[in-house]
Amino acid sequence: MKQLRNNIKAFLLIFLSLFVLFTGGVILQSQRARTTLLASSGENRAALAQRYSQAGSIISADGVILAASDTAGRRSYSSDPQLAEAALHVVGDYTHNISNTVESLWQNELLGEGRSLSEQLLLDIQGQGLQGNDLILSLRSDLMKTAYELLAGKKGAAVVINYQTGAILASVSSPSVHPDQVVAWKDIPDTSLFNRAFLGEYLPGSTFKIITASALLQSNLSTEETVMCQGSTPLIPGGVNETYSNAGHGEVNLQKAMAQSCNHYFGSVALQLGDQKISRAAEQMEFNQTISFDRFSLSKSQCLIGREDKAALTWAAIGQPAGKDIITVSPLHLAMISGMIANNGRMTEAYLLESMLYPSGNESTFNNRGDIIAQIDPGLAQELKDLLRQVVKSGTGVNAQVAGLDVCGKTGTAETFNQAGELVISSLFTGFSNNQDYPFAVAVVLDDSSYGSSVIAGQLLAAAANY
Ligand SMILES: [Zn+2]
């Protein structure tokens, strides 16, 4: 009898402690919900600061803190001001003045919300219940800084990815500002909060010749057939001519045309292929589709052509759409196109988050890394690779050469008019290092500089390989 009473006592005690823990957990949970509600209803700076006071850190792949909340509850960004500015558009700010950033899209995890009850209870017992989770990104702090320094305040974007894994190693937009200025909302230069790398909608210019070449290689037309370049004389009335080579490139086949970026050749090819084959080649490389990963979405790269006459088709072939035609590309997508060619025709899904660290020390990695989102024939990829190698070896892309690396790529120049009606020339380069040990693809876009992107691209590939 006494034994039974003792058993009952023990049972009641266990039940009681569980009950206290559970209620405690529920109280903490509801308190947390209340502060969240408070913050979201007011969304004023003080409430947001309060909300992020125990938020988790955002950390680069090489272990450098990009955002963290200190013991006094203050949230701050990288102690290196250059790095803080370089990472602004991806990391974001706790006031959410910039949307679509890690701070905003991954807020729940950073604040430790949405955990399962058991998980939360366990952390509550350990006194870590109010701490958020840390997020480890794929970004490399050294490459972020290098990219930002190379852009040197010019308007533009630079992206480096690992084309085998899909990891985004660097993604920088310029101009930028320090996150503290964004939080304080003062001294913010025009367009400096815009994530050009993800959301820019650029004319691809001659980088689009990769697509036209891909369409040609998949057709039954001969790549050895030559075209006589007419220089500054238009191919057909209203059609393409050579802006940068009055005398022209002489007689060119596909390889020479790609290396020299001959407009006459690709315009002439487009007239034989027609718009549909070019559109299809673009869609094989993810044009007209929304590319999303880790809750981020890129602005959709578009290829809507063939709505004008033959002259416009020749312009579309060189990535300089005319009339009602639309061709745009985002810098990250441009890097993924190069990555696809480098990776034997497989486009790997991009990612930005490596893993999540719980206050308990447990780490969880994310699934579906290395997923293939688009594919072209490996033989086609090899042919494109060989063409892009010549561009860097002896053509318009020689400035992207890096000693010891097999760099392949394509240059581009695009002309557009700004709101004031002035001609703006942008410079683009996309390419990759064709080395198994250095599987890096790059895209650089300078909004209003007519040259310079290939130099930056080469230096970025070199920096990535010197890690
Ligand atoms: Zn030419």
Image: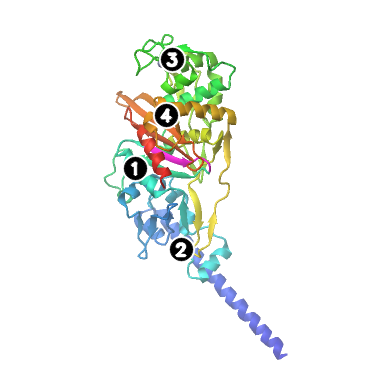
Q: How crowded is mark 1: few (under 14 residues within 10 Å), some or many (20 or more)?
A: many
Judging by the rendered image, the residue that carries numbered circle 3 is 264
* Left or right of residue 129, residue 53 in this image: left
Q: Where is residue 250 in the image (x, y as percent from the top left)?
A: 41, 12
Does the rendering let one see residue 307?
yes
Ligand 1 quadrant assignment: top left
According to the image, label 1 marks what residue? Answer: 148
- In the image, what residue type sits under mark 2? Gln
Q: What residue type is labelled 4?
A: Val
Q: Position of residue 106 (x, y in %)?
A: 47, 51
Q: How crowded is mark 2: few (under 14 residues within 10 Å), some or many (20 or more)?
A: many
Q: Is residue 273 above or below residue 366?
A: above
Label 3 vs 4, first from the N-terminus? 3
Instruction: Tell me, for residue 392, which label it has, or none.
Output: 4
Tally the numbered discs: 4
Amino acid type indicated by mark 1: Tyr
Q: Which residue is drawn at 28% across and 40% down?
A: 189
Q: Where is residue 392 in the image (x, y as percent from the top left)?
A: 42, 29
Which residue is denoted by mark 2 in the rendering? 131
Tell me if residue 346 is in the magenta stretch.
no
Q: Residue at x 55, y 30 (%)?
A: 381
Name which of mark 4 and mark 2 comes first in the sequence.
2
Range shown magenta: 157-164
Does residue 88 appear anywhere in the picture?
no
Check the image and name the residue furthest to the right.
Answer: 1
Query: Which of 337 and 288 lies nearest the eye of the viewer?
Result: 337
Q: Quadrant of residue 100?
A: top left
Q: Quick one: label 3 or label 1, which is nearer the N terminus? A: 1
Contact? badges 3 and 1 (CB < 8 Å): no
Asked if 56 appears above or below 241 in the picture, the reply is below
Counting from the top left corner in percent of width and height, residue 262 is at 42, 18
Which residue occupies 48% across, 31% down? 301
